[in-house]
């Protein structure tokens, strides 16, 4: 194998290693508005099971309220979003710099990245097939 081909293979491997680190880290971006109205793309990380549990315990939000999508408690969700945003963005002052409610966008992205099952399972049943006459 010539040197150029070896170099190219090593570059590809390095790219794959970096990609796998990003995938394992579970990062993405979400656009939030700062207090001055400027929009920023903020890097958001997935949170572990332990981190989400700690945020729920810290805020005192009832887990049943989180699961109840038909009658959510806005204040409870907002408290949780403000607890999660600093952890997910690795910025302890993020909630002081963004407009009200923007922490909810960050929390929503965390749920997606962390694959949190706070949603109803999809109905995978197919429609019944009518017998042929």
Image (cartoon, rainbow, N blue to C red):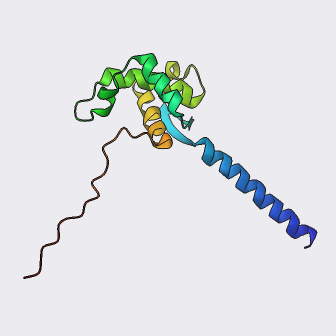
Residue 102: image location, x then y, percent: 43, 29
Q: In the picture provided, is 68 more to the left or to the right than 132? A: right
Tag count in the figure?
0
Q: Nearer the viewer, residue 18 or 24?
A: 24
Q: Position of residue 123 (x, y in %)?
A: 27, 54
Q: Residue furthest right?
A: 3
Position of residue 100 in the picture relative to residue 74 (left or right): right
> Percent from the top left, x then y, of residue 2?
92, 72
Q: Is residue 36 visible?
A: no
Residue 1 percent across, percent down from the top left: 90, 73
Q: Nearer the viewer, residue 31 or 28?
A: 28
Residue drawn 42% across the image and 17% down it: 59
Q: Quadrant of residue 94?
A: top right
Q: Residue at x 59, y 24 (%)?
A: 91
- Relative height, residue 6 to residue 111 (above, below): below
Above or below: residue 1 compared with residue 104: below
Is 71 above or below relative to 130?
Answer: above
**Identity of the residue drawn at 49% across and 22% down:** 54
Q: Residue at x 87, y 63 (%)?
A: 7
Q: Nearer the viewer, residue 44 or 46?
A: 46
Q: Nearer the viewer, residue 127 or 6?
A: 127
């Amino acid at each position: 194998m010539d040197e150029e081909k070896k170099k190219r293979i090593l570059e590809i491997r390095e790219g794959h290693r970096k990609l796998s680190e990003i995938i394992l880290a579970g990062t993405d971006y979400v656009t939030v508005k700062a207090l001055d109205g400027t929009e920023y793309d903020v890097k958001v990380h997935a949170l572990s099971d332990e981190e989400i549990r700690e945020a729920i315990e810290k805020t005192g939000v009832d887990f049943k309220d989180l699961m109840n999508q038909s009658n959510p408690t806005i204040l409870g969700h907002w408290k949780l979003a403000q607890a999660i945003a600093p952890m997910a963005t690795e910025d302890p002052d993020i909630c002081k710099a963004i407009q009200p409610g923007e922490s909810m966008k960050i929390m929503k992205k965390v749920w997606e990245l962390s694959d949190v099952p706070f949603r109803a399972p999809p109905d995978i049943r197919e429609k019944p097939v009518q017998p042929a006459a």
